[in-house]
Image (cartoon, rainbow, N blue to C red):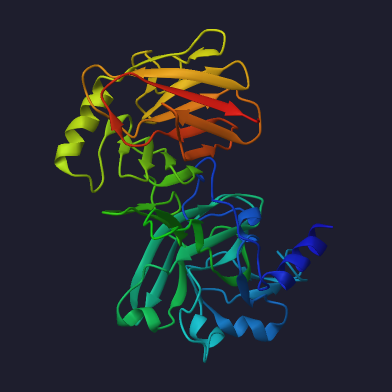
Amino acid sequence: MRLILLTIILITGCAQQPKPPPHVGEPLGLQMMRTEAQLTKYPFRILQQFESPVDLAFVECNGPQPQLSPTRSHTGHSSAIFDRGTSIAVVKLPSLLSGVKWPGQWTLIGAYFFAEKPQRLRATYDVDGKALLNYTVEVPAGQWTPLLLDISGIGGPTAAKVGILRLAFPNGLSQQLWCDDVLLLNNTNEIIEPKHGNAWSVLEKGFNYTVHLSNSTITLKTPEATDQGWVLEEANDIRVRFSSRGKEKARVIYADGKQYIDGNLQPLGIRPSIVIDLQSAHENPARISVPEELGRVNRNSPGDRNNDGYDETNGAYQLIATASRIEFTLAPHGNNLIRPAIEISGLPAGAATATMEGKWVERIVRLPNNNLLLELPGEFTFPTTVNVKVGQ
C-alpha cells in the first residue's frame, strides 16, 4: 500500500497543487530534513530513480562503485547503494539537467537516503569546483529520509550554472547507504499575500521566511538552515509568530511593525517618536477589566511576566470569555496606547464582530486554536470600552 501511495504521489507531483498551509509545528531535528508529508504539498520533479544499470552513470564514487540494490527502494523496484569504504559520492546534476533553464522555479535539490544506523555526512552543492552550499548532517536510522539543499539563495552568475551534489563521508562509509529519487522541489509559499497596496506579506522560499512590512523587510532562516532557525507557528493579517530552539525562543511580528523577541520590544521601521509610546505601553500596560458575568482577565498566560493580563511575549492583552459576547475596558496609565492587540479565548465558533466606543473594529482574526485576535484602531490615552460578540 505504501509503494502504491508513493507511486501516485510521484506521478501527480508536478501537477497543479492546492495552496499548501504554512510550514508549522516543532522545529525539525536535522538540518535540511523535511518529512514526506511536507514534500507532497509542493510541485516537484524526479530526476533519477535508479531503476536500471544505465542510471548509475549519473553517480560517481571515490571507492567502491555504486550498484543497483533490489532489496531497498524509496519508490520503484531498486535504488543505488554506496558500499562500505566509499569516501565521496557525486551526483552529476549537469547530465540530468542538460538543456534545462536553471534554476527556473526550483528552490530545493536533493535525494532520499536510507541507512541501517545513523550516518553522518557532509553535503555540498558545487559549481566550478567551489562549494556554494555546505552542510554536515546526520541521516537517521531505519527510514527513507529526504536530504535537501536550498538553492534559492544562490545569486550572481553562478546561479544559472547547474552544479553537482557532493556527499563526503569522513573516514569512509562503515556501513552501506542507499540513495533513491534525486529530485527538485519548489516550496515557494505565499503564506500571507499583500492586499490592497498593503506591503504586509509573509513568504516561505527555500529555507527562509521573508516578512515584508511597509517600512521594513526581515528574513528568518528555518531550522533546516541553522540550529538557531525559526518555525512558523501562526500567520494572519494582524501578526506572525515564530518559535525557535536557539538562543532566542519566541518572535512575534505585527503588521504595523511592532516586534517582540522573547518579550522585548524591538520594532521594525517605526518612527522613534512612536517607539517611545510603544515602549511605555509595553513596560506599563493599561489596566484591563471585564464584567464578571461575561468573562475575566487571563493573568496566567505563559508570556505574562507580571500577571496583569498583558502577555509581553506576544504583545497582546489576554481575556477569557464565558459567553458568546464579552465587554472589556482598557484604561492607560497616563501613556498612549497605539493599536493594542487583544486575544480572547472561550468565545464560541462563528463570525465575530467588535465595536469600540460605537465604531466598528475591522481587524479581527480567528487563530488556529479558535481564540479571537483583534487589533484596536488608532491611539488613545483615556479609558476605552470594547464590545465583542459572536453571531447575531
User: Residue at the right extreme?
Assistant: 1
Q: Residue shown at 38%/35% (left/top)?
A: 250
Image quarter (top left, top right, bottom left or bottom right) of the C terminus: top right
Instruction: Classify residue 70 as left or right of residue 301.
Output: right
**Image mark count:** 0
User: Residue at the left extreme?
Assistant: 273
Q: Picture coordinates of residue 248 (x, y %)?
A: 33, 36
Q: Picture coordinates of residue 185 (x, y %)?
A: 56, 68
Q: Nearer the viewer, residue 55 or 189?
A: 189
Q: Picture coordinates of residue 160 (x, y %)?
A: 39, 83
Image quarter (top left, top right, bottom left or bottom right) of the N terminus: bottom right
User: Residue at the front extreme?
Assistant: 358
Residue 176 visible in the snapshot: no
Q: Nearer the viewer, residue 370 or 157?
A: 370
> To which quarter of the image does residue 186 belong?
bottom right
Where 376 sits versus 209, above or below? above
User: Residue at the top extreme?
Assistant: 292
Q: Residue shown at 15%/38% (left/top)?
A: 273
Q: Picture coordinates of residue 123 (x, y %)?
A: 44, 64
Residue 96 visible in the snapshot: yes
Instruction: Classify residue 274 as left or right of residue 36.
Output: left
Q: Residue shown at 57%/64% (left/top)?
A: 84
Q: Residue shown at 65%/26% (left/top)?
A: 348
Q: Nearer the viewer, residue 345 or 124?
A: 345
Where 270 sits versus 99, above or below? above
Where 99 sits versus 125, above or below? below
Q: Nearer the viewer, residue 153 or 91?
A: 153
Where 58 sits versus 381, above or below? below
